[in-house]
Amino acid sequence: MPVDIAFVTVNYNTLEYVKDLAGFFRSLETPFTFSFTVVDNNSQDGSQEFLRSHSEINYIQAGKNLGYGRAINRGVAATDSKYVCVTNTDVILNREALLALWRFLEEHPGVGVCAPRLLYENGRSQGMVFERSLFSHYLHWLAKLRAKRIKEKLANATVPVKVQGVMGAFFWIRRFIIAPPALFDEDFFFFYEDSALSHALADRGIPCFVLPDVSIIHIGGKSRSEASVSIFYKSKYLYLKKFYGPLHARVVRWIDRARILRKWLLYSALSRLFPSDRMRHKRRHYHHAWNASRLH
């Protein structure tokens, strides 16, 4: 049956978060109709048994780890709705935010995408806004400065803020603006599929807004491992190649390698001088990043 909103998420061994989301939607009362779809990427933590036992959840078993965007595409294709809400499993939702997003899209038919502010559990703002900026890929400090600026802008805003795009942890989109063949580009396994989508929508002139007066909590990082660093850099250079060309992708890769090598050497030295779990974690991270940057 068609509904107003199809909530679609991907699960990969995050059973406890899926249980929390299922409980939230089971008790949710709203003026709009909705469905809750979980695409499971062959989890081995008891998720499959849980999802099979709850008929109120639209459960799709992928049979293997499809990655994020590809799995979301399967969920979107299996639903029928006016709006699609793409969400990670590791979010803590609230009714007020969902109502505000629904009302905003209903009252602004020209808007294609919207999202609330995303916060960490401690209340800090997350980086969630996409901006087209080739220079930010060349200059790491510029990317951090731009991210800080938009966080401050959202924190101080009192009206919806128009942005170029939002990241994929949680957003609403009108179904009719999804261009075939699918919402996300399936060349991306994990990471940067949301940047590619935001970039493509911005190129089409699709308006996107963040509602700063409502927020949800995004815990983050629960399906990642140190091995995912390699996937991150592969996806980053694929994104750059698709939207800016192979030359820029190669140059940014070499800039990244120099920055990562400097950080690896720094934290290797610091971990000897000031041994701590944090220093060892940093050293391992940049070691993995260095190996990943050499491969892609």
Image (cartoon, helix red, strand yellow):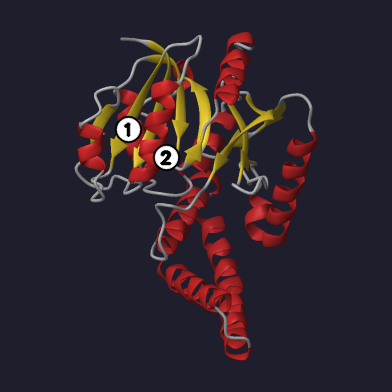
How far across and how far down the image is residue 128, in percent? Answer: 61, 42
Q: Quadrant of residue 41?
A: top left
State which quarter of the image contains the C terminus: bottom left
How far across and how far down the image is residue 71, in percent? Answer: 32, 38
Going by the numbered disc 2, the residue's amino acid type is Thr
Of 238 and 189, nearer the camera is: 189
Q: Label 2 to label 1, Cα distance in Å?
A: 9 Å
Q: Is residue 54 left or right of residue 289?
A: left
Q: Is residue 270 above or below residue 65?
A: below
* Residue 139 is at least partly visible in this image: no
State the residue position of label 1.
38
Of 114 and 205, nearer the camera is: 114
The crowding category of the residue bearing disc 1, from other C-alpha atoms within 10 Å (few below 14, some 14 to 19, many at least 20), is many
Dot label at residue 19: none
Q: Is residue 63 above or below residue 291?
A: above
* Residue 226 is at least partly visible in this image: yes
Of 268 and 257, nearer the camera is: 268
The crowding category of the residue bearing disc 2, from other C-alpha atoms within 10 Å (few below 14, some 14 to 19, many at least 20), is many
State which quarter of the image contains the N terminus: top left
Q: Is residue 47 left or right of residue 139?
A: left
Residue sitting at x 55%, y 23%: 95
Q: Answer yes or no: do the residues labelled 2 and 1 have beta carbons within 8 Å?
A: yes
State the residue position of label 2.
89
How far across and how far down the image is residue 160, in percent? Answer: 72, 25
How far across and how far down the image is residue 80, in percent? Answer: 35, 15
